[in-house]
Amino acid sequence: MSLNSSEDFRDQLSTADQEGRRRWLYPRKVRGRFFRARTWLSWLLLALMFAGPFIRLKGNPLLLINIVERKFIILGQIFWPQDMIMFAVALLVFITGIIIFTAAYGRLWCGWTCPQTVLMEMVFRKIEYLIEGDSHQQRALDKAPWTAGKVARKAGKHALFFGLSFIIGNTLLAYIIGTEQLFQIVTDSPAKHVEGLTAMILFTLVFYAIFARFREQACTFICPYGRLQSTLLDENTIVVAYDYKRGEKRGPWRHGQSFDQRRAGGNGDCIACQQCVVVCPTGIDIRNGTQMECVHCTACIDACDQVMDKIGRPHGLIRYASVNGIERGERLKVTPRLVGYTVVLAALGMVLGFLIFTRSDVQTTLLRAQGALFQKMPDGRYSNLYTVRVLNKTSRQVPIQLKLENCAGSLDVLGQELVVPPQKQAETSVLIELEPAAMKPGTTPVVVGVYSQGRRLETLKTGFIGPRDDTVQ
Ligand code: SF4
Ligand code: SF4
């Protein structure tokens, strides 16, 4: 794309040398408007991430993904194996949403909200800067011989990294098994929770390995969403892009040189200062064009904007833009395609929200008791016996009342009042009696309302069996 690109950049990894050995990256500290905005957002996201397992909605955690026990809670709603169809629809909506979002907005998620980027750049990297200094100081420290000072700094940093990884690992575990079980593992005898303790140690080690060693490699080689990008992005997608039309041909800037003098010498706005490269946490040169490694963290935008300030040129030599926008020399604008994608995305979000929030608190089945036929009662009415089974999907006790909705007759729950304990199933027998005048020959359709504390939760349809001839009338 750019005129001065190194021709073989797509054949090389920025994080490996010719022999394939890891090339450690020392990205320089970033300052600028995007970094400030990302910092504020990261505080909010970190607070949400760590507080998430403790936040309760309707008495349930905000999010719980217990794969082992097949128990899922999303936004306080418990999903049971019986909800799998709805869960599959929600998953489909979610995946479609991701595809549309990425096609329109590129890797906005990766740069601004992905936990890997937020934790790496806003927590672990900042600790590293605090203990070892900026990029050049870190390089010097790594090259320096092992002195007591170096050992202390390295040990301190890694102890902090390990401690943080332990907290992150436990937070993830809390999202899987819930805070109550996590506290039990911590407070009980270790012998009682071998699996839980193993998971705790494993998660801690994985997070420590990711943030202390793998770092950008997790985005480049492991993350499946990152791998999908190449198939989802096109020339209209918003990406972090270098405006090669404005920037080329690159050349150093001489103090006091005016823009007209640069243009006369065949140069563009890029002064080849490499500031966009040295801040990049994935070690790439964005001037080579859109690359798989770019997580759209905006560090290069901030770095280049600062350079533009110094040489008196407008911001945005590197900016959010589409490839077509750069081609035509346009600033970022809202295209009909972007509006269309956003509308579809909002609609999908609403479908997902509707599915989650309109889900019934209970799931009831009403079946005619096996082998039971109709009976004629002494008062002339006919009766059918049913078995009712109620699954309580909430974490509170639910008293259930059943009402006959569409015929003249009565409905009686046999035995005690039907009260379903939290997250449990209850079963009882129900006797429905109909007036002969309300019955049809053979089967009469019957509608039963399922109520709790005066609120109708569900409506069930079933058949009421009576004599086949018209003697019922
Ligand atoms: S920071 Fe801007 S001016 Fe400097 S090399 Fe990068 S694109 Fe060119
Ligand atoms: S090229 Fe720019 S946006 Fe992409 S990862 Fe590097 S610094 Fe971040």
Image: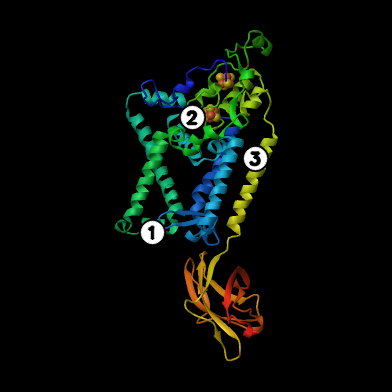
Residue named by callout 2 = 281
Quarter holding residue 465: bottom right
Q: Amino acid at mark 2?
A: Pro
Q: Position of residue 57 (x, y in %)?
A: 55, 59
Residue named by callout 3 = 341
Quarter holding residue 470: bottom right
Query: Does any portion of residue 351 appear in the rendered image?
Result: yes
Residue farthest top in this picture? 265
Disc 1 residue lies near ligand 2 with CB under 8 A = no
227 above or below 21? below
- How far apart are the two marked residues, 1 and 2, measured between alpha carbons? 39 Å
Label 3: how many residues lie within 10 Å, few (<14), some (14-19) or many (20+)? some
Q: Position of residue 38 (x, y in %)?
A: 57, 37
Q: Decide which of 189, 394 is in the foreground and name it.
A: 394
Mark 1 vs mark 3: which is more N-terminal? 1
Q: Position of residue 468 (x, y in %)?
A: 59, 80
Residue farthest front in this picture? 469
Left or right for 466, reference 261: left
In the picture, the disc for residue 184 is 1
Disc 2 residue lies near ligand 2 with CB under 8 A = yes
Q: Position of residue 80 (x, y in %)?
A: 49, 60
In the picture, the disc for residue 455 is none
Residue farthest bottom in this picture? 378
> Disc 3 on helix, strand or loop?
helix
> Disc 1 on helix, strand or loop?
helix
Question: Contact, CB < 8 Å: mark 1 with mark 3?
Answer: no
Label 2: how many residues lie within 10 Å, few (<14), some (14-19) or many (20+)? many
The label nearer to you, 3 versus 2, is 3
215 above or below 262? below
Q: Amino acid at mark 3?
A: Tyr
Q: Amino acid at mark 1?
A: Gln
> Disc 2 on helix, strand or loop?
loop
